[in-house]
Image (spheres, rainbow, N blue to C red):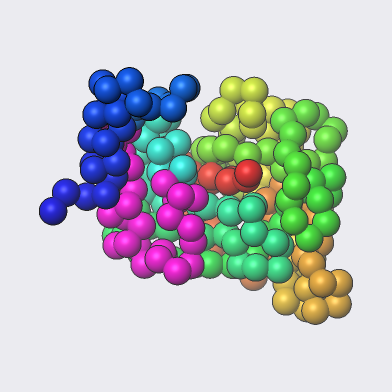
Amino acid sequence: MRPASELNTVLAISLSLLGLCPSGTAVPSPEEVRTSERADELYVECGLNGLLDASTFRSAYASVVRHHASSHILALADMTRPSTEKRLYIIDLASRKLLFRTWVAHGRNSGDLNCTSVSNTVGSLQTSKGLYRVEGKIISPKHGDALLLQGLDPGINDKAMEREIIMHGAEYVSAAFIEEHGRLGRSYGCPAVPVELMPRFIDLLADGGLLYIYTH
């Protein structure tokens, strides 16, 4: 039996040839079909079913392929979920394992409980979506050990360095903060994570790991 994605593509092509495709509907290229099928395979093999929407992972994987990024460690932040949910996934694509699932904060001006807006503008204090390459470990004067992030999507997150967007630990990313405030604390646009997990994330992501921030 053919995979559902292949059947959908065959149907789309058939409808297009018959002139029945809705106006503006794009027929996926063979490469896009292969990428989608591979993403769906990895989604299952990594044990993400029921933990993360398949479409979210598909979007992240397509971005990795599009940028020809070679790292096998992918951090995926699903900012469509409220900050009270563990919406950061650290995935080893090579060994096909979900290594961590935890909380991650969004920017102060991106919303309260939910991330409702994004920006690439300096001084916006908002989250930026898209794919990032994780650079080396740095020492932040305010947050201690942290990871520098380079935005790979022009016009979407390529001001990350200028904005000093980093992955860092924060006390406001914790179960205790959620219990007291009903949400996580918020950053200046950085994907802040639990303090106790930062050393492990540095080991996994420094010098070439990937971070994908997904939003609506």
For this rendering, which residue is in front, 3 or 69?
3
Which residue corresponds to the image point at 64% horizontal and 29% vertical from the top-left? Answer: 156
The answer to whether residue 96 is above or below residue 126 is below
Quarter of the figure with residue 105: bottom right
Which residue corresponds to the image point at 64% horizontal and 23% vertical from the top-left? Answer: 155
At which x and y percent is residue 52?
A: 49, 61
The answer to whether residue 123 is above or below residue 78 is above
| Visible residue check, residue 57 | yes
Q: How many marks?
A: 0
Left of 13 or right of it: where is 148?
right
For this rendering, which residue is in front, 131 or 83?
83
Magenta span of residues: 29-58
| Visible residue check, residue 141 | no
Which residue corresponds to the image point at 53% horizontal and 44% vertical from the top-left? Answer: 212
Q: Is residue 213 magenta?
A: no
Which residue corresponds to the image point at 57% horizontal and 37% vertical from the top-left? Answer: 130
Image quadrant for the C terminus? top right
Left of 200 or right of it: where is 66?
left
At which x and y percent is residue 174?
A: 73, 72
Q: Is residue 45 magenta?
A: yes
Q: Report the magenta stretch's main SS.
A: helix
The answer to whether residue 198 is above or below residue 17 is below
Quarter of the figure with residue 13: top left
At which x and y percent is residue 196?
A: 64, 70
At which x and y percent is residue 133?
A: 52, 38
Quarter of the figure with residue 5: top left
Hey, which residue is sitting farthest left in the picture? Answer: 1
For this rendering, which residue is in front, 105 or 56?
56
